[in-house]
């Protein structure tokens, strides 16, 4: 390699950010997120569900052995429709990875099963592979009965086990919330 | 007649009634229209207000989601230093173990292997810094120094107190500029991407209490893992198809070099003089973070392909001059193949490394020419002084591999016991590791006088190790480990001449049985 090219490489490094479209760390904004998990939907009705002790107890009970690393003060949810038909629900949740919260959206079908998961913000210095479609696709079709844990029903990402566990906890929390609020609100459990 | 009159009256009155009805209907329609317009206006106003409120809420949440600590803190008007400090996360990992061995010189012992402090700071959305500071077997380091006048002269004295084998080391210290997922610029003290262990060396990621021979115990890598070098380069990854991924790291670095280690020995001997000696050993070491000792730089790159999650195959190489400027110019070339494959609870993971040190003979002759004589000694009164020069740990070629077979399991009946009741996903991991290392042209001894080599012997050796281990992980970052090791080299030759951790120099001790109990943690 000619050393004369080095200034060009540095020039590229300095100028490229102006051209780069992707934003490292932030992958989806809130208004884009529900479409990412329900691409066929025609409307999204946004509803903010305040979190209170009663709701937390319901979620906790549904999550079983899986705990949560944080309780959000409220949950931003979307009732997802195609025409007049309800396709499902989408919930924005947060869980702590190793040190920082991971923000992601979970799409839940009317049958209570995960439709899809999409990462919105990833803040950890390592383990960004959990944002990959090939990782998140593992959650599709899972329900509250699934362990959603690495080495059990989820393939781990080397060096990002805590982030993998965090996504699993968040998905379970979203499933529990959808069941408690939308699918079986009358269920006292 | 009556009927006729009635019909006539009806005909005469009808238009009047009709006119009156039309008038009422028009009024009614107008009122209804007004009402409708009012309702439409109110609905439009309510819709506008609702949309505005929703927009505000959405904007607030989007802002919250977008918050990557920096922007949030700066909005609150804090100082830049305060921002970075507030975002910085401090973590750590470490390990300790208890080992028992059949070797006479190796005591059964607890060892606090290492405690590594880590920090990471997202300086801004695209810039971040990471640091690992290692305290290896470290207990204390104390330096006392003073200069004073005494006895009509000047006296300068220095005392260093430190614990045995203690080491403080900067394992990583780099800054990264995330240009795009496929192009990230990294500079500083970075891990050399040769094989898979060096870049994933955190103790708590592994299930056996001792690191591999290839990476640590021999090593076959040009320098012992964890092996950082100061340099700069790029890394990133690309999606390949629906499930595949190609990752790369590519760096230019100072690189590994032959550097000196000086050992001081003070020794009293029965019926003989007291000996005070310095042994200067020139051996391959990680490059300096200061001015390079040589003119050439090293290149290191690793390319990994993962066809789907959990599986990976990678190739890597390292090339660079390893001789300091006062010795003939010769490069070291290493290449490694590594990979991992997962089948449900079963995993196979391994690494092969091949390192060739070119021109070992010429380097030995150059070393003799520069050092002039291997040993210099003199005797004054009852004190003998000796200085000795050695060239160590060089071989024409070293190659070796490790392969881990793992099985992860958790008996459900343990969920109600102390092992499982407080944890959501505890695990046992059974590991069988096989390792072999081949040495070709390993320097056995070297002698020189007057700048000429007088003796230069090399040998070929083989080192094998098998390990069976069981680890209990209540949470991913903590493991309690138990392992049995069997290590063996060529019959009748000592293990200490081919490893850097088995101290026995007795030739009859060419094998070792060891039991290790370890604890590794991270947070």
Image (spheres, coloured by chain):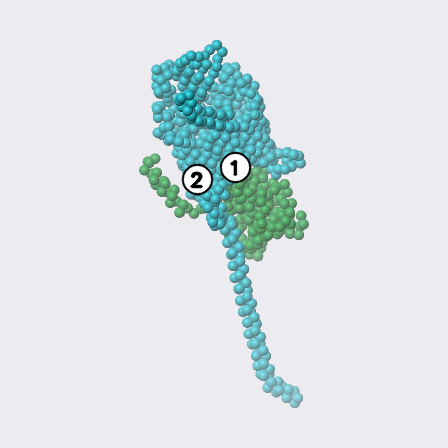
Chain colours: A green, B cyan
User: Which residue is outermost to the bottom?
Assistant: B1
Residue toward you, B41 or B74 = B74
Query: Measured from the top left, where is residue B14 in percent x and y?
Result: 60, 83
Report the side of A19 relative to B24 (left or right): left
Residue toward you, A70 or A145 = A70
- Spatial CA distance of label 1 from label 2 is 19 Å
Q: Which residue is mark 1?
A: B91
Marks 1 and 2, the one that precedes in the sequence: 1
Q: Residue at image x 58%, y 78%?
A: B24
Q: Residue at image x 59%, y 52%?
A: A49
Judge depth for marks 1 and 2 and give the one in front. Answer: 1
Q: Which residue is mark 2?
A: B176
Q: Secondary structure at mark 1?
A: strand
Q: Is residue B330 visible?
A: yes
Q: Is residue A116 visible?
A: no
Which image quarter is the N terminus of chain B in?
bottom right
**Label 1 Cα crowd, 10 Å radius (few <14 / some 14-19 / many 20+):** some
In the image, residue A13 above or below residue B137: below
**Label 2 Cα crowd, 10 Å radius (few <14 / some 14-19 / many 20+):** many
In the image, residue B461 above or below residue A34: above
Q: Residue at image x 42%, y 26%?
A: B147
Chain letter of mark 1 equals B
Chain letter of mark 2 equals B
Query: Measured from the top left, where is residue B151 in percent x and y?
Result: 42, 21
């Amino acid at each position: 390699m000619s050393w004369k090219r080095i200034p060009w490489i540095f020039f590229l490094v300095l100028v490229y950010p102006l051209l780069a479209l992707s934003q490292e760390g932030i992958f989806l904004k809130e208004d884009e997120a529900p479409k990412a998990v329900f691409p066929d939907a025609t409307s999204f009705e946004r509803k903010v569900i305040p979190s209170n002790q009663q709701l937390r107890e319901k979620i906790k009970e549904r999550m079983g052995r899986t705990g949560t690393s944080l309780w959000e003060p409220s949950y931003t949810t979307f009732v997802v429709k195609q025409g007049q038909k309800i396709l499902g629900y989408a919930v924005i949740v947060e869980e702590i990875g190793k040190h920082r919260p991971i923000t992601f959206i979970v799409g839940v079908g009317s049958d209570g099963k995960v439709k899809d998961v999409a990462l919105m913000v990833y803040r950890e210095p390592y383990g960004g592979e959990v944002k990959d479609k090939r990782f998140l696709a593992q959650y599709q079709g899972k329900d509250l009965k699934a362990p959603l844990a690495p080495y059990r029903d989820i393939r781990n990402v080397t060096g990002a086990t805590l982030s993998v566990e965090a996504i699993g906890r968040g998905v379970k929390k979203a499933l529990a919330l959808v069941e408690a609020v939308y699918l079986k609100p009358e269920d006292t459990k | 007649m009556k009927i006729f009159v009635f019909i006539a009256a009806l005909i005469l009155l009808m238009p009047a009634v009709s006119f009156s009805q039309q008038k009422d209907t028009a009024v009614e329609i107008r009122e209804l229209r007004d009402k409708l317009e009012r309702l439409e206006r109110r609905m439009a106003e309510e819709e506008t207000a609702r949309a505005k409120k929703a927009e505000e809420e959405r904007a607030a949440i989007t802002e919250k989601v977008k918050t990557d600590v920096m922007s949030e803190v700066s909005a609150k008007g804090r100082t830049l230093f305060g921002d970075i400090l507030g975002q910085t996360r401090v973590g750590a990992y470490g390990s300790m173990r208890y080992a028992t061995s059949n070797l006479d010189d190796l005591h059964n012992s607890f060892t606090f292997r290492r405690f590594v402090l880590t920090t990471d700071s997202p300086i801004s959305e695209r810039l971040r810094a990471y640091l690992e500071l290692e305290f290896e077997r470290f207990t204390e380091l104390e330096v006392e120094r003073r200069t004073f006048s005494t006895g009509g002269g000047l006296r300068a004295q220095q005392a260093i107190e430190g614990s045995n084998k203690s080491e403080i080391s900067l394992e990583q210290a780099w800054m990264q500029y995330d240009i795009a997922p496929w192009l990230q610029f990294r500079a500083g003290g970075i891990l050399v991407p040769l094989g898979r262990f060096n870049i994933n060396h955190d103790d708590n990621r592994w299930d056996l209490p001792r690191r591999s021979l290839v990476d640590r115990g021999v090593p076959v890598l040009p320098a012992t893992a964890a092996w950082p070098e100061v340099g700069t380069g790029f890394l990133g990854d690309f999606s390949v198809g629906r499930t595949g991924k190609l990752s790369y790291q590519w760096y230019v670095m100072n690189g590994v070099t032959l550097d000196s280690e000086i050992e001081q020995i003070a020794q009293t001997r029965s019926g003989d003089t007291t000996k005070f000696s310095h042994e200067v050993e020139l051996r391959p070491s990680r490059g300096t973070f200061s001015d390079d000792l040589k003119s050439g730089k090293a290149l290191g790159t690793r390319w990994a392909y993962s066809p789907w999650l959990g599986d990976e195959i990678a190739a890597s190489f390292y090339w660079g001059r390893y001789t300091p400027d006062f010795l003939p110019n010769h490069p070291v070339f290493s290449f490694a193949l590594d990979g991992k494959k997962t089948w449900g609870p079963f995993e196979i993971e391994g690494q092969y490394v091949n390192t060739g040190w070119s021109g070992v003979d010429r380097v030995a002759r150059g070393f003799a020419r520069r050092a002039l004589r291997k040993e210099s000694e003199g005797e004054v009164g009852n004190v003998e002084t000796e200085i000795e020069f050695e060239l160590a740990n060089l071989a024409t070629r070293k190659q070796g591999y490790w392969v881990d077979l793992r099985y992860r399991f958790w008996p459900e009946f343990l969920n109600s016991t102390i092992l499982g009741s407080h944890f959501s996903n505890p695990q046992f991991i059974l590991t069988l590791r096989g390792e072999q290392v081949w040495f070709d042209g390993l320097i056995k001894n070297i002698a020189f006088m007057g700048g000429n080599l007088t003796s230069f012997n090399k040998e070929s050796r083989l080192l094998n190790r098998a390990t069976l281990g069981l680890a209990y992980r209540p949470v991913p970052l903590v493991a309690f480990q138990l392992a049995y090791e069997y290590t063996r080299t060529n019959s009748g030759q000592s293990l200490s001449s081919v490893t850097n951790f088995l101290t026995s120099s007795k030739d009859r001790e060419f094998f070792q049985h060891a039991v290790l109990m370890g604890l590794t943690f991270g947070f």
